[in-house]
Amino acid sequence: MEELVNIFIQSIFIDNMVFAYFLGMCSYLAVSKTVKTSVGMGFAVIFVLGFTVPINFLLEKFVLKSGALSWIGDSFIDVDLSFLSFIMFIAIIASMVQLVEMIVEKISPALYGSLGIFLPLIAVNCAILGGSLFMQERAYDSITEATVFGLGSGIGWFLAIVAIAAIREKIRYSHVPAPLRGLGITFIITGLMGIGFMSFMGIKL
Amino acid sequence: MSDKKEVLFSKKNRKLLTDPLNDNNPVTTQVLGICSALAITVQLKPAIVMAISVLVVMSVANVVVSLMRNLIPSRIRIIVQLVVIAALVILVDQVLKAFVYDVSKELSVFVGLIITNCIIMGRLEAFALGNGVWKSFLDGLGNAFGYGWILIAVAFFRELLGAGTLFGFPVIEKLGLYEIGYENNGMMILPPMALVTVGIIIWIQRTKNRDLIES
């Protein structure tokens, strides 16, 4: 349990997808103009990360890892398919996004109305593939750990995009030097927020 | 075919190659591909390896998708594009692992993240799907160079100011600046400073080219 809380906190604050690894920056910059849309996008990312990381974990554990295919028979013990992981992960992500889109549309049209337009964007959001690749690199032990990591990273990304959207809404009333307006100042603010988030470094539960 | 009448390096084609270097730069103007761009700019060497990898993937992917552009049903085009890119990235990854293993370790997940690098997807969507092979190739090259020079510029300043070295060579020490009291700015090595550096590049670029200023 302690370990899980640790992974959760760490993936939200310390290894924040945006501030520590710059993942999902494209949609982070494109969708953060107003708080409302950024909340929608943030939820969509939490949702998809929470699904794809555990699924890719199973894939990694039972198909891709060196020796993972040993459950088929002894002759498969030496098979190492890890070089295929990129293509498998992205295929899972693209099809999961499609699937999630259809399920959400069926079950909750209201949620689909607010998330719908963001879901296709998510297939090419680096944070999603990044989540799966970090999961692979850090070699989590169990599917619970992988799920917690996925959710935590999603929440970290959510916090980042909502915070920057709020700042960008306010900064419209400030006198930013003309060449810095828009993109430039957003980069610099993100940098400053990153420095702020670095104060979480070293926290260990 | 109007393509055949056009000279190989006509003015229009040259523009495809040079525009992304400055006025239509993928990173600073189109705001694409920042995801994987910044995390690997602590040192010059990985930045250059990354720039070359993107160059290869992008130009080949543009050519392949441009060749298939009349065959791909538009509903599944995103998945087709992802598969093309992913296959190319796997190739690049294997080559890196074989020849420059230490750099490949350093880049870790960011080689894989070339797949979701929005520049590549963006150019495939916006250009390769609607244009001929040669033009798409030039567009890919141009955008990859535009991406690459930003990457290398950021890495240059971060390595020089942060660690006092270039390609691992201790420039500052050789110049003797430490003796007169110069100190490395350790902050440049930290991730947030990459964002600030790009912000400053955008600032300089837009000061020079006022058309790009956002209202």
Image (spheres, rainbow, N blue to C red):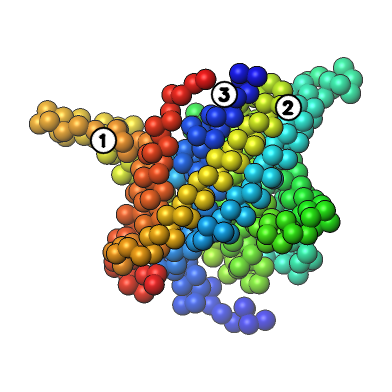
- How far apart are the alpha carbons under marks 3 and 2? 15 Å
Figure check: B132 above or below B33 = below
- How far apart are the alpha carbons under marks 1 and 3? 32 Å
Nearer the N terminus, badge 3 or badge 2?
A: 3
Q: How many marks can you see?
A: 3
Q: For the residues labelled 1 and 3, say whether their Cβ atoms are less than 8 Å apart.
A: no
Farthest residue, direction right: A73
Between B169 and A70, the one nearer to me in the picture: A70
Q: Say which chain tag 3 marks.
A: A
Figure check: B155 above or below B77 = above
Residue A2 figure quarter: top right
Residue in the picture at 32% in, 54% down: B200
Residue B81 location in percent, x, y?
70, 56
Q: How many neighbours does mark 1 have within 10 angstroms: few (below 14), some (14-19), or many (20 or more)?
A: some
- Label 1 sits on a secondary structure element that is loop
| Disc 1 residue type (three-letter) | Asn
Q: Is residue B159 visible?
A: no
**Residue B124 shown left or right of residue B177 in the figure:** right
Which one is in front in this view, the residue at disc 3 or the one at disc 2?
A: 3
Figure check: A51 above or below B140 = above
| Disc 3 residue type (three-letter) | Asn
Residue in the picture at 36% in, 54% down: B199
Residue A99 location in percent, x, y?
80, 51
Residue in the picture at 52% in, 20% down: A205
Residue at numbered disc 2: A143
| Disc 2 residue type (three-letter) | Ile
Which one is in front in this view, the residue at disc 2 or the one at disc 1?
A: 2
Rendered image: mark on residue B185? 1
Residue in the picture at 38% in, 60% down: A171
- Label 3 sits on a secondary structure element that is helix
- Label 2 sits on a secondary structure element that is helix
